[in-house]
């Protein structure tokens, strides 16, 4: 090994050590922020205002419900991810003090310690049980491979709380699901499922059977690809049933290839005017992502499609009512493709359409696209009751300020932190436009 290799390896170790120290500092800061937002047993609260919540497990303190929003904005992550992060940190410190000590001293990676705290919390142990587990497990953690640590923890949990392990098994069955998830390519998607093991065995066997039938019909794709096609066949049970009957030599009056058997799909596709005029360009499919418009046939080719033309309205529609008419709702959903909270990736459909300037009974023209933005429930409550300030100086541009003074601008191009580094001004102006020079509005967040 030459000197340059040695120097690079030394720098790499230094980077890893710096990252470990930063993880510790981050966890300690989150723990301190949580302590600052604690609610004591004697505290009172307004039912419609800020509320205390227990983010962690048994033995952790009640905290301000909007604490995760502050962490999410500071770290640039989703509110859900921030909630999990705060949960793991407060659980680790309150329920596993020995492991917390080891992590803060660098004996155990902080992220591993948080992972173990999260694993233990799944079993709903009391704080006394968690601390006993901590006493028995902590001496072994620094010396064991991580897989063995998790196996040892599971064994100790079974010993300390066998009933909780059995209860979690029932909770797991109650949490069964099937979900469609995006991938890095909008043309394909994941299907994630949590089902009974027996159902998984039968389903896997049926997928395999249909994949074999496709091969017998001349499909030359690899087995894995044919199995993925089999999922599409099973999405239409009548088609699958006919395929199985035909393979068994019992064809019916309707063939399995009849297009009338295909399901009718409801898909929201946004196509720009330029794409329609040029015959080429991107399209955005809600819950899928952007893809070339010419590839829409791959997305929609296995369904009967009903097209509903949508012309993007530019003229402002105004209502005096608090309830939001459908034409105005459609305007907002066409403009705001994601929730307008900093760094959020939540789709707007299903979210509250929040009045940026709160609605006042008797006022005129308060319900309009330029005074609305999609927000999920907790950010909506933070704006209303938690001291978070919001302005919408121009339609679709949202200025936020948190109770601790963080400021953000949210728009079509995402989220920009405000006022952090003067050297970023030219980049911010290029991204947001010349009006960025003026800064946030004077009222609300300025």
Image (cartoon, grey):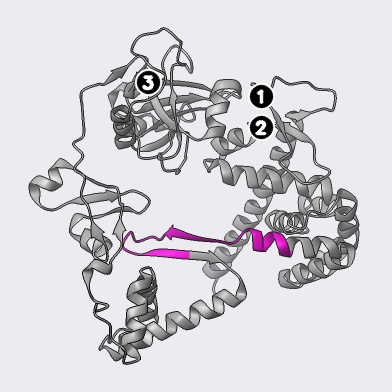
Alpha-carbon span between mark 3 and mark 1: 24 Å
| Pointer 2 residue | 65
Residue shown at 70% from the left, 38% from the top: 29
Image quadrant where residue 395 sits: top left
* Left/right of residue 99 with respect to residue 234 in the rendered view: right
- Specify start and end residues of the magenta stretch as a single range: 169-191
- Report the number of discs: 3
Would residue 206 be counted in the magenta stretch? no
Alpha-carbon span between mark 2 and mark 1: 7 Å
The residue nearer to you, when weighing 211 against 234, is 234
Q: Quick one: label 2 or label 3, which is nearer the N terminus?
A: 2
Name the element at disc 3: helix
Q: Quick one: label 3 or label 1, which is nearer the N terminus?
A: 1
The residue nearer to you, when weighing 118 against 251, is 251
> Residue 1, can we see it?
no
Residue 50: numbered disc: 1
| Pointer 3 residue | 371
Residue shown at 42% from the left, 85% from the top: 209
């Amino acid at each position: 090994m030459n000197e340059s290799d040695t120097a690079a390896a030394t720098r790499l170790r230094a980077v890893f050590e710096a990252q470990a120290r930063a993880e510790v500092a981050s966890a300690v800061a989150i723990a301190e922020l949580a302590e600052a937002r604690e609610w004591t047993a004697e505290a009172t609260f307004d039912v419609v205002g800020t509320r205390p919540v227990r983010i962690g497990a048994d033995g952790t303190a009640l905290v301000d419900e909007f604490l995760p929003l502050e962490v999410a904005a500071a770290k640039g992550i989703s509110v859900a991810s921030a909630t999990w992060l705060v949960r793991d940190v407060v659980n680790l410190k309150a329920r596993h003090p020995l492991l917390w000590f080891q992590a803060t001293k660098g004996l155990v990676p902080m992220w591993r310690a948080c992972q173990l705290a999260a694993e233990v919390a799944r079993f709903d142990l009391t704080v006394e049980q968690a601390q006993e587990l901590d006493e028995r497990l902590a001496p072994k953690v620094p010396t064991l491979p991580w897989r063995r640590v998790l196996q040892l923890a599971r064994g100790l949990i079974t010993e300390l709380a066998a009933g909780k392990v059995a209860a979690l098994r029932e909770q797991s069955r109650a949490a069964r699901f099937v979900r469609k998830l995006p991938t890095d390519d909008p043309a394909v998607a994941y299907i994630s499922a949590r089902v009974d093991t027996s159902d998984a065995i039968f389903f896997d066997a049926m997928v395999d059977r249909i994949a074999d039938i496709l091969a017998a019909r001349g499909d030359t794709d690899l087995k894995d690809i044919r199995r993925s096609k089999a999922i599409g066949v099973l999405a239409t049970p009548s088609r699958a049933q006919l395929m199985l009957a035909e393979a068994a030599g019992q064809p019916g009056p309707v063939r399995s290839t009849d297009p009338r058997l295909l399901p009718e799909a409801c898909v929201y596709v946004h196509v720009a005017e330029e794409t329609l005029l040029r015959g080429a360009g991107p399209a955005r499919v809600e819950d899928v992502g952007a893809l070339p418009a010419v590839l829409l046939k791959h997305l929609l080719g296995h369904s009967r499609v009903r097209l509903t033309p949508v012309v993007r309205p530019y003229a402002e529609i105004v209502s005096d009512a608090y309830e939001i008419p459908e034409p105005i709702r459609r305007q907002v959903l066409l403009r705001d493709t994601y929730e307008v909270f900093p760094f959020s990736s939540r789709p707007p459909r299903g979210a509250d359409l929040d009045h940026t300037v709160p609605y006042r009974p008797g006022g005129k023209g308060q319900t309009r696209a330029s005074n609305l933005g999609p927000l999920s429930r907790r950010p909506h409550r933070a704006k209303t009751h938690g001291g978070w300030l919001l302005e919408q100086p121009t339609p679709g541009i949202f200025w936020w300020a948190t109770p601790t003074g963080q400021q953000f601008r949210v728009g079509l191009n995402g989220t920009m932190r405000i006022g952090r580094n003067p050297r970023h001004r030219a980049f911010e102006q290029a991204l947001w436009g010349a009006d960025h020079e003026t800064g946030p509005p004077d009222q609300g967040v300025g």
